[in-house]
Image: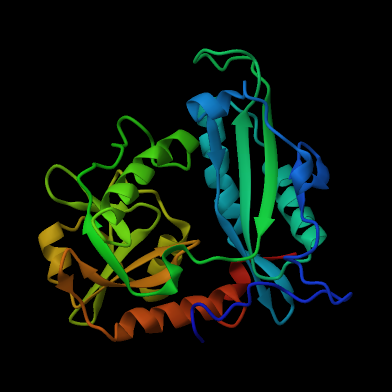
Amino acid sequence: MQLNDAPATEQRNDGETAAEAPQKLWFDGTLVDQGALQATLGTHALHYGSGVFEGIRAYATRDGAAVFRLPEHLERMRKGCELLGMDFDTARATEAVLQTLRANKLGDAYIRPLAWYGDGGFGLDVSGRAHHFMVATAATNLHLNGNRTRVSVSKWRRNPASSLPPLKLCGAYVNSILAKRETKARGFDEAMFVDEDNYVVECTGANLFFVRDGAITAVEHRDALPGITRDTLIRITGADSRPVSLEELLDADEVFACGTAAEVAPIAEIDGRSFDANSPLSREIGAVYAATVRGESSWSGRWLTRV
């Protein structure tokens, strides 16, 4: 099974594709047309990044659409909301995700829940401010395009966990935007963060693994997002998880990035250091992951929420 064999749209009963139909999003308890809502210019999150998001995937399976590891994604989102002082009802968010997928009749889908602070004047104190919750869905696009990726170490450092906890806080991702812009300007596809001691952290939106002499290692760093795809692959492969220096990573046979949007993406090179062009073990892992998210492996049952 190819990692990028999922169709971009799902055929509806009326002959219209889901991508062409008017899309719905869930906003504060109601399904509405996606183009019907606008945020005001005084929205606090617009000015200060005071929001929390998740990236989640649904997949078409033999038994219909299913969401992969939905409880784990929403629990991570709950932690971010708690940190910012926003109420978050996991059961309500679960139903919002499922209702939105049903309304948009998508099998393969990227799901974006977002909680954020709205109007209430300028200033950094969020106490008592109104906050909102939405869920939007879209036809799937792979981060890193599902291809072998050219990576470069960014001049920027990852936000340290002592300053910003590694959760999906909206404002924190300016760090990733800066890194990606800087490395793309130098002709690369993706940026990689290393710390001041030259230990690998992660890419801008994906965790890292490497293969050496057939052994699989997950890069571990306190500043990296605790990725749900990363956790999935560790469980499936039995990979060792530990800190990894840049020198050790560059000595690997294969390197791959992983994440909800990236799935399993083999890395072609890091700053001119090329890796195995066939990436055999990375592609085998990717195939097992693809089977798992589509309900075709022994791991699937514990991780799929039926739509």
Question: In the rendered view, does 56 fall on the left or right side of 288?
Answer: right
Q: Taking the image as drawn, is residue 299 in sight? A: no
* Snapshot quadrant of residue 189: bottom left
Q: Position of residue 18 (x, y in %)?
A: 76, 67
Q: Position of residue 31 (x, y in %)?
A: 82, 46
Q: Is residue 95 above or below residue 21?
A: above
Q: Nearer the viewer, residue 131 or 238?
A: 131
Residue located at (17% from left, 51% from top): 199
Q: Position of residue 78 (x, y in %)?
A: 57, 39
Residue located at (68% from left, 50% from top): 136
Q: Nearer the viewer, residue 240 or 141?
A: 141
Q: Nearer the viewer, residue 37 or 82?
A: 37
* Snapshot quadrant of residue 13: bottom right
> Looking at the image, what colour scheme do you see?
rainbow
Q: Position of residue 194 (x, y in %)?
A: 20, 49
In the rendered image, the residue lying farthest to the right is 14
Q: Nearer the viewer, residue 213 or 172?
A: 172
Q: Is residue 270 above or below residue 86?
A: below
Q: Is residue 37 above or below residue 288?
A: above
Q: Quadrant of the C terminus?
A: bottom right
Residue located at (49% from left, 37% from top): 170
Question: In the rendered view, does 229 fall on the left or right side of 148?
Answer: right
Q: Taking the image as drawn, is residue 2 in sight? A: yes
Residue located at (40% from left, 51% from top): 226
Count of all numbered marks drawn on residues in the image: 0
Q: Is residue 74 above or below residue 133?
A: below
